[in-house]
Every structure is written in C-alpha cells, then in structure tokens.
Amino acid sequence: MASNGNEPFKFQEQTWAKFSRGHSGMVVAPTGFGKTFSVFLAVVIDYLNHPNNYKKGIKLLWISPLRSLAKDLAKAMSEAIEDIGIDWEVAVRNGDTPQKVRRQQERLMPDVLITTPETLHLLFSQKNNSRWFKSISCIAVDEWHELIGNKRGVLVELALSRIKLLSKQVRIWGITATIGNLDQASKVLIPFPDLKVVTIKAREKKKIKVIPVLPDEVEVLPWAGHLGRSMASKIIPIIHENKTTLIFTNTRGQSELWYQILLEADPDLAGLLAIHHGSIDKKLRNWIEESISEGLLKAVVCTSSLDLGVDFKPVDCVIQIGSAKGISRFMQRAGRSGHSPYEVSKIYMIPTHSLELVEASALKEAVKELRVEDREPQILCYDVLVQFLVTLAVGEGFSHEDTLNLVRATHAFNALTDEEFAWAIQFITQGGSTLKSYEQFHRVYKDDNGLFKVKNRRISMLHRMNIGAIVSDAMLRVKFLSGGYVGMIEEFFISKLKPSDSFVLAGRVLELIHIKDMTAYVRISKSKKAITPSWMGGRLPLTSYMSHFLRKKLSDALEPGIRERELKFLHPLISRQAKYSQIPRANEFLVELIQTKEGNHLYMYPFEGRLVHEVISALIAYRISKIKPLTFTIAMNDYGFELLSDQDIPINESNIDMILSKENLMDDVIASINAAEMASRKFRDIAVISGLVVQSAPGANKTNKSLQSSSGLIFRVLEENEPNNLLLRQAYTEVFDQQIEEVRLRAAFDRISESKLIIKRSNTFTPLSFPIKVDRLRQSVSSEKLDKRIQRIQSEIYKKTKV
Amino acid sequence: MNYVEKEIHINNQRLILNNLRAVFWADHKSIIVSDLHVGKSKHFRKHGIPISSKVQESDLERLHFLITLYKPERLIIVGDLFHSGHKDEVSIFKKWLERFPLLEVHLIKGNHDRISSNSPAVNNLYIYDDELKLTPFIFVHIPIDAVKDFTISGHLHPGIRLKARGRPGITLPCFKLCKTQLVLPAFSLFTGLATESIRKSNSYYAFTDTSFYEF
C-alpha cells in the first residue's frame, strides 16, 4: 500500500486499521514522519475495500490552518492517487482560489477538498450548501495543535458539529504534534459521544541538538539587546558551514534589523540572504519559499511566519536569535531543519544578552525531558458564535432549537445557557436589549417558517468579507509608484510618517510619497537613516513551563553540570550576583532594594514573563501605596520587574509577607489595574469577529468609509448603553484568562508564599536588575491617575514657554 | 451636566472653549460646533451593526444643555451636521430644532452634508455651500491654510497623542489653534480622533471630563 515502496511506520498502519473499523481519532507524530499519509491513505484503503460505502462528491475534507501547505499537499495526494490508480480528484479551496475554479467546484465538488477553517465557513454562507457535505466519510483536521488554542479552533469545532449533522457516516481524525494536553485536545476536537475515538502515537522521535553560541566574553552587567551586533560574526560562519539556514527572530522589526546587520557583516551574502515575515508581499514570500526549496538561498531571516508550513528539504540548520519564550515553539523551530525522519535537527541559540544563556540551558533540559506546554482550548467565545449564526443566516437560514443543539454539541459551547443563546439571537435580530434604541436594525430576520435569514444583499456581502477569526491590525499595502508590491505595513506606524520620510521594509529603505486607497506609495530612498517599523503585538509571552525551567537553571547555576558549558561561561556574572545580592534557589524568592542617585528601586524576580509581571508589578505598587502613598515608574522584563520612586520604599522584613501575600489576591489585582482599559484592548478582536467593526481590506479601492469606527469607540458606547452585552463580558473574561492569567497568577503567589522571602539591599545594580533598568529607559508605565499623568507630561516634556 | 471652560482671545473676541465640545463666541452670542454626524448610529444599524440610538440622543441633549447654558442667539455648525445625507436625518434634526424657535442655525456644509442649500428650510435654518463670513471670522468646514482672515473649522476631529517615556501613550480630543485658524473637536461622541504629535508652532487645548490642558 505504501506508494513509493517505503516501509510504512507502525502508527500509519495502526491508523489504517482503526479507520477501517469505523473509528475516529487523533494521530500524534513529529513532522516529517508521514502524518498526512496516515489519515489520507486510511480513507483511500477503506474506499478500495468498500467502494459502495462512498457516494459522489467530497469523500475526504481536509482542514489545514495554513494556505501555504495546501498546494504541496494536493500534489502529494494526487501523485499517490495516480500511483494507486483510482480516479479521484483532489482540489484546493482557499482565499487564493480563483473565482472561476470556485464556481466549477460548486457545480461538482472534488473527492478530496483541502481547505481552511475560514473558507469552510464561507462555504456555509452559500445558498444550498448542505448538499456538498452529505457524502463526506472523513474530516481530517491537520495541525490541530495550531488551532486548538485560538478562536480558529472554535470555528473548526462548529464546522465539525454542523457537518456531522449533515453526514451521518462521518469519521473525524485530528493530526497533531506533541502538546501537553493531548487527551483534552482529542476531546475538544471530537466531543461526540457516538464516535469511537482512539489516540495513535508515533514511537519515532525527532532528535534535536541544541547548540548555544557563546559570546567572546561575558558582561557581568548584561544589557538587554545589546549583544546583538557583536554576535553577527558568530552567525556568518554557521551560515557558510551549512547548506541552508533559517534564522528565527521574535518580531518583524528584529528580522528587518538582523537582515541589515548580517548583510553588513558579510556583503557577499547579497542575493543569497532573504527576509521573510508576515508583512512582506505574498508573491515575494512565495518566491522566497520556492527558492528555499530549490536550495537557491543560503539563509533566510524570518519570524514565526516560517514556524509552520511546507517542509524545506535543503534546510539543515536553524538559528534562534534571542529567547524563543516557549518550549514547544523552540522545538517546532528546531524541527524545521533536518526534515527527513532520521536526520538530527540542529538549532543554534544566539543570546541577545548574557542572561539568555540561562535560557539556553533551560531549553536544553526541557527538550531532553520532552516537557511541552498545554494549549488551552477557548470556550464561550460569543463573538465566534454570533459570527457563525449570521453565517448560517446568510447561507440556508437556521432554526432556533436545532442550532442550539448543534452549538452545544461542541466543546467550546458545551456550557452555553439558554439565556446566552437567546441573547445571541436577539443581538443579531434586534441589535440589543432595548428595542427602541435599535430601530432600523435589520441584520437577521425570522421568516414565516421560523428560519433566521439575512435578506439584505449588502449585509450578506459585508459579512462574507468578515468571516474568520484572525484579526490583524489595520494594514496598508506598500507599493512602488512605478508598480510592484513590497508588502504590508501597519496603519498605526505609517500614520506617524510624513511624506519623504524613510522606513525599512523587506530589507529595503523606502521613501513615503503618499497614501491613497489603503495603499502607501513609495520609492527607493537614498537616505541612509531610516526608521524600522515597530509592529504591534510582537511580544510573545513567556510560557509557564519555560519559567519553571528558568528558575531551576538559575538556581543550579552556582554548581553547573559538566555538560552545561553555557552556565560555566556565565560564572563571572553569577558570582557577581551572588556577591552583591544572591542567586535565588528554587525555594527562594528574591527581593532587591537598590538605592542609586536615580532614586529608590525595588526589584522582584518571579520569572513569570512580561505579561504576568505587568499585573504583579501593578499589584505590588498598589499594596505599597496603601502603606504610604507613592508614585512609581514601573519597568519589567521576562525575569522580573522594577518599581522606581523618588522617595523611600517602605518595604522591610516585617511587612514583605503581607506585600507578597496571596490573601485578597484578585481583589487587590482588580483594584490595581485599569480593567476597563485592558478589556477595551481585548475588545478589538471581538468587535471585528462579531461584525461590530468593518475591516477594510488592504489595497481595496473602495473602503466602507461611512461605516468606519474603532472598536474603542464601540466599547465605550456599549459600556454606556448596554453594559450587559455578552461581548463586553467576554472582553473582561479574556482579560482575566489571557492577560492577567488568573490561574497562573494564583499559582505564582502560591509558590511565592511557600518560598523563603529574601530581601537584599545594595547601592549598585546587580546582574539581574541591570537589564530591567536598561529596559525602563525604553519603556515604562506609571502608576499615576490619568489627570496626574497628563499634568506631569505637560510640565516635564512639553514645557511651553508662555508669551 | 458637568463642564469646564477655557477662555481664549482671538482678534479681540472672547471665545469660551467648553469641554462639552463647543465654543461660545461671547461677543456675538453664538455657539459654534462641528461634526455632529446626526444619523451615524442609524446608518450603522441599517448596515447590520447595532449601535444604540442613545448615542445620538445624548449628543443632542448635550447641545440642548449648552444652549440653555449660554442662551445664544445663534448656533453655527461648521459642517458635517449629518452623516449619510438621508432625509430622515434632516427631519430628526429639524424636529429637535423646534425646541428653539428663536435660535438661528447656520450650517456650513461639510463633505457629509448632502443637503441642498435651498431645501425647504425651517425658518431659522440657514445653509451655506462653502463659507460664512462674520467679521472678524470666516467659518468653513475643512481647515484652510495660509489665508489672511482667521478661519474656524472642523472636519479633522483633532486630537493629540502625548508621548511620555513609555507606554501606553495618552490620546485626548482637543481644540487646535494655529496662526490663522481654530479647528474644533468633533461634537458627536461617536467619532474617532485624528491624533497628531504636538508641534511647537500650534496651541492645543486638550480636555478630559474634568480639565483643560494647554500644550
């Protein structure tokens, strides 16, 4: 059966056997081991054995989160089908599929359809769409680990639930890489009690070799981000030693920067080095991806844009610049090299400051123990529910009772109450709870047969454009005046530029000419100085597993193991920390009080990542200000945070227990943060997904200008007029679950309360505190009230000389 | 309703800026406002986006309050009174206007105002295509640079972005004063802001619910 005479892996054979016995399930295997063929061939084999069980139309529906995979996947499947000699048609349908092909497909669907969650929902919004789903024998959800943690996963859950109602014989198979909560992942994908579910794990393991690259000398006061340039000379030889290297950075801004640095360090790389990130024009990205496959490029600087996707055969080396912030992300990136099953994946870690070497050591251990993070499934996303209901209303229309059952069958909406569902219906039919305030609102009607439908063509059109759960910042296309696209850039960034200003994109220095129709027109700039765009949302949070390993390694650092060359290398730094303060052991919590001419600094090191520190630092500032009213400047990094005040900070051995107490934790947190402001930020995605904000497609000539509004504006309007709106409530829930990470915060304070609290006093910065201090100069938050802040800024920065 | 005021003097005229987003021209007994966008929330509702009509009601209540506060003889609207130009919008506003039979209303048409200048007006509503001159000011919708006369305009929805060392920055609506022009903030609360960084050559009267700040 194995098409090319290759011996099949055991897990593949198991999948084929289970499938033929009518099971559904989950296949867990590392990339490069033929996960695709485990499920795909299972369907083909079953078809060969029982051709009469299969009807005309789609037999296998393949849902993949990535568009870029689809083409290669279709090719591989078509070849296999040809070898086996059955007359199946394999086709792709996604955002790139031309109109003409779509219409053809709608007349006669292929036997295997490869699509994305979004395009599947778009199909649901077509007239008479259910006929396409009646013949499906198997739905395969590829890369489920990429979907389960976000709202796209909820789109998949809803789609499965609907198709299962239309096609009684359907089996559901998920394909995933290793994640922490595999059992849960399987239950979320296949929550249907009438399906028999198995989990099949590949025994094969990917070997990963982690190589930390040490700088020439260790700086005892590490300056965050400062090592960068000097490490370029270490990267160049690695590039030359290997065939093709992927260089991962964490943000698009960093990738632009490193592209320049590497070209400066070795001008011979010109033409052999490329840059790849989400804001670069799709055609250019496709070209780069093809060039990697053909081995034409020596190295590519990229972001998470290349975390997944097509397997690039020539890639034999991966470089990670700076922290990867998470174990599974790190392993995934490592896996991009040495792709065939028995090759070793090789990943170099380039620290951007000395302390990141501790991280390298932590990653090595985590990879050895194969401890990867959980991906928490999302629940009760009312925004996705609202979108789904309107999608159904645009398509064939829906009835109250049946749809409630369909929705509740999913994991995400298992706990949906009758009232909440009724609210969603009311929201799409009447707009809000006070009917009088929403006259003329006609999104969805109830027709004479009790079916909810959309009648207005323009509303259907707007909705179709808006289907999906990926919300990007408002983006503009960047285009040369002479023609040709460069890529995309955030409106937020470009709105700050004036014509003739220069900026860097796709490794080129560009001069802005003008902006028209959501497109920024540029020409190549002669200027030497240019601004690198700061793309928003580039900061990845540190995962809690990662912080666990970090604390452990730092605690070990005084007595490094024989193989831990990076920890030995760090010895001067570690011993300085031990001399002037202390290295916190696993059961200790370190607090540093440092007095300098800048003022009084308080440092704490929970090692929980920047996002959690944002919350903890506000909380500590709040608790201190209850003892003595103080205004702080707050700064943080992934390891700890700083509170800076011009006055004495009243913290000592007698009250530190109280300051770090887990009593009244959430009450104090709520009092200390501006929850409304945080929720307003979270509301952005919710507003777009639920259709409250109309997004203009970049490059679109016609913008829906008269319907433009910001989510912040709508948030304010809703808070004033409809405080019980479930979408508002969802924004607050998301703040607590994702921003404040309530569960993790409680765990952190449980841990702190069991730790020995140590206060160290010093007149000089310690190796741990210094990077935070340096970061403060770039960005900090303040604990003042709005009016006070404005007054301070007014007097300090915008000193106006009165005439 | 709570409000704060800030008095400025231009061409020997007293202009009282109010943080309820209006200017009272004391010497001429006129209230000046801009960008009411009457009918905007309804336009959204019609396109399937539920925005409560209370938004608009509260805008008009605020205007009502200002009129009872300053007891003006004139209301000057420097454009974008209406959002989409639908006839309902016009009738809603005219109906509201019946509360003030003695008030003269002067509308300088904005890009959103698709209302005919000689539409069957209520007696006290006057409409101008481009500008209205009332010495020593010229009222227009879109700000014009480099003219000798002092213009009062709207259209921009001006706001400022304050950058302190650090994030997040603060954005505030403002009255923007350049050499020869004053740009008013949008009166409707259901409007966005066109924020800019502060330039030394301009003055900005930014406001919160409780205070005015001059930059």
Image: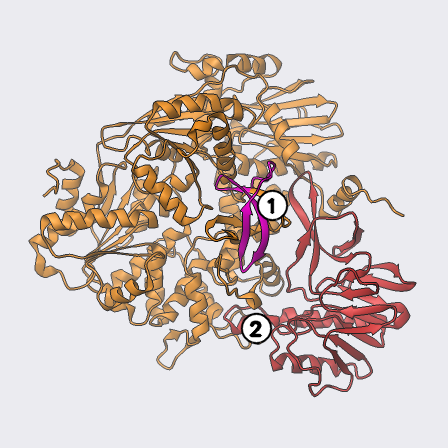
Chain colours: A orange, B red
Q: Position of residue A262 (x, y in %)?
A: 47, 29
Picture quadrant of residue A179: top left
Q: Residues within 10 Å of mark 1 (few under 14, many from 20)?
A: some
| Secondary element at image label 2 | helix
Residue A473 shown left or right of residue A332 in the figure: right
Name the amino acid, label 2. His
Residue A289 is a magenta residue: no
From what the image shows, is residue A655 above or below residue A104? above
Residue matched to label 1 = A670
Q: Residues within 10 Å of mark 2 (few under 14, many from 20)?
A: many
Between A542 and B183, the one nearer to me in the picture: B183
- Image point (56%, 17%), residue name: A219
Label 1 marks a residue whose chain is A
Label 2 marks a residue whose chain is B
Q: Position of residue A466 (x, y in %)?
A: 44, 61
- Image point (38%, 21%), residue name: A211
Residue matched to label 2 = B43
Q: Position of residue A233 (x, y in %)?
A: 47, 21
Instruction: Give the residues in magenta.
Output: A504-533
From what the image shows, is residue A155 above or below residue A351? below
- Image point (64%, 27%), residue name: A773
Disc number placed over residue A742 in the picture, else none: none
Name the amino acid, label 1. Ile
Q: For the N terminus of chain A, which image quadrant?
A: top left
| Secondary element at image label 1 | helix
Q: Is residue A731 visible?
A: no
Q: How far apart, in angstroms, are the residues tagged by discs 1 and 2?
A: 37 Å
Between B34 and A615, the one nearer to me in the picture: B34
